[in-house]
Amino acid sequence: MYRKLLVALDHSSASDDLFAQALELAQATQGQLLLVHSLSSEEAGSPSPFSARFDNIYWAPGTEIDVEAWRQSWVRYETESRDRLQKYTATANSLGVAAEFRQLVGPVAAAICKAAQEWGTDLIIVGNRGRTGLTELVLGSVSNAVMHRAPCGVMVIKTGKLSDAETPAIAGVA
């Protein structure tokens, strides 16, 4: 039975649903939750100096970057992430599920797998938006990378809805 459930969360609205489903599973199995988020330039909306835009600061190769403004953006990003993890943890604990959180730094899939190994995780729960083809190639697929590197079982839960541009066309389906 799955007793130690690691839940990989991000800044998307889909994390609320992913957390709710993981909490339900933890309650059913009398399991514990480890809620993780990796601070990474890979995440949409992160204040990476390699992003196209952050906090009204534009950066292009060969131009200067306002390091102090970037640092302030990063601190906000880090704080918002920690606050969200603390909220989820408090909710789980108030419902009788032992929960803790870790805020990680680095490439998302690698950080998740490392945390799973260190904590002795039985099951990693990760969301997937269903990107395929070029969109997956360009944006990557954390869930796919985790499935291939994980030291334990992985449950991938469909989260969010793809935009029409991201939805793959299926022949014969209108």
Image: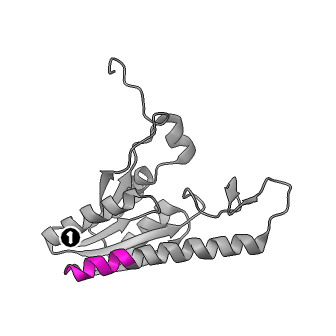
* In this view, 163 is above or below 94: above
In the visual, does 30 lie left or right of 82? left
Whether 112 is among the magenta residues is no
Q: Which portion, as a residue range, is magenta?
A: 87-96
Amino acid type, label 1: Ala
Instruction: State the count of labels.
Output: 1
Overall secondary structure of the magenta stretch?
A: helix
Q: Looking at the image, which is closer to me, 44 or 153?
A: 44
Q: Which residue is drawn at 51% across and 48% down?
A: 140
The reply, left or right, for residue 49 in relation to residue 90 is: right
For residue 98, say whether it is visible: no
Where is residue 2 drawn, in percent x and y?
20, 68
Seen at 77% across and 71% down, the residue is 67
- The residue beneath circle 1 is 26
Q: Which of 14 and 38 is in front in this view?
A: 14
In the picture, which quadrant includes the C terminus? top left
Residue lying at the far top of the rendered structure: 172
Quarter of the N terminus within the rendering: bottom left
Instruction: Name the spot of residue 42 as percent of width and height, x first.
Output: 57, 57
